[in-house]
Image: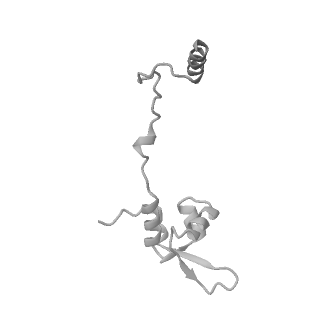
């Protein structure tokens, strides 16, 4: 099953095979530095345009953009989506046993001797 291509992306790729980083940033919308980090981490593939003597120009294909969008799409985890109410009452049957209570009991036993 072929994923639905959003209309703005389809229009951008209608007459060209690749789009520039600036065009992609405008379409997603995404800051240029953020896109650069995704490129650096290998989250999105690109086509090197030109020879890159001064600066590498990157082109992005529709397939690469759609894969990036699909892999970055997520839903919120149900286990953390709603804040759970903290329990207000203790359910354990433990009684006393604090350090000071044990110390007082020990001192009392020592005095009896």
- Is 57 rendered above or below residue 1? below
Q: Is residue 51 left or right of residue 12?
A: right
Residue 113: x, y in percent?
58, 15
According to the image, what is the colour scheme of the structure?
one colour
Along the line of sight, which residue is nearer the eye, 35 or 10? 35
Residue reaching furthest front? 113
Residue located at (44% from left, 56% from top): 73
- Is 42 rendered above or below residue 113? below
Q: Is residue 52 left or right of residue 68?
A: right
Residue located at (55% from left, 66% from top): 24
Along the line of sight, which residue is nearer the eye, 93 or 17? 93
Along the line of sight, which residue is nearer the eye, 65 or 17? 65
Residue located at (61% from left, 78% from top): 57
Residue 4: x, y in percent?
36, 62
Residue reaching furthest top? 112
Residue located at (42% from left, 46% from top): 77
Residue reaching furthest right? 54
- Is 20 rendered above or below residue 74? below
For the image, the number of numbered tags is 0
Residue 112: x, y in percent?
58, 12
**Location of residue 55 (image quadrant):** bottom right
Residue reaching furthest left? 1
Residue 107: x, y in percent?
61, 18
- Quarter placement of the N terminus: bottom left
């Amino acid at each position: 099953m072929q994923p639905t291509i959003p209309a703005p992306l389809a229009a951008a790729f209608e007459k060209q095979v690749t789009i520039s980083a600036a065009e992609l940033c405008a379409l997603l919308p995404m800051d240029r530095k953020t896109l650069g980090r995704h490129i650096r981490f290998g989250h999105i593939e690109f086509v090197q345009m030109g020879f890159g003597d001064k600066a590498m120009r990157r082109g992005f294909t529709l397939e690469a953009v759609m894969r990036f969008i699909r892999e970055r799409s997520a839903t919120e985890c149900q286990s953390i989506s709603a804040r759970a109410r903290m329990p207000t009452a203790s359910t354990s049957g433990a009684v006393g046993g604090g350090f000071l209570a044990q110390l007082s009991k020990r001192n009392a036993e020592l005095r009896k001797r």
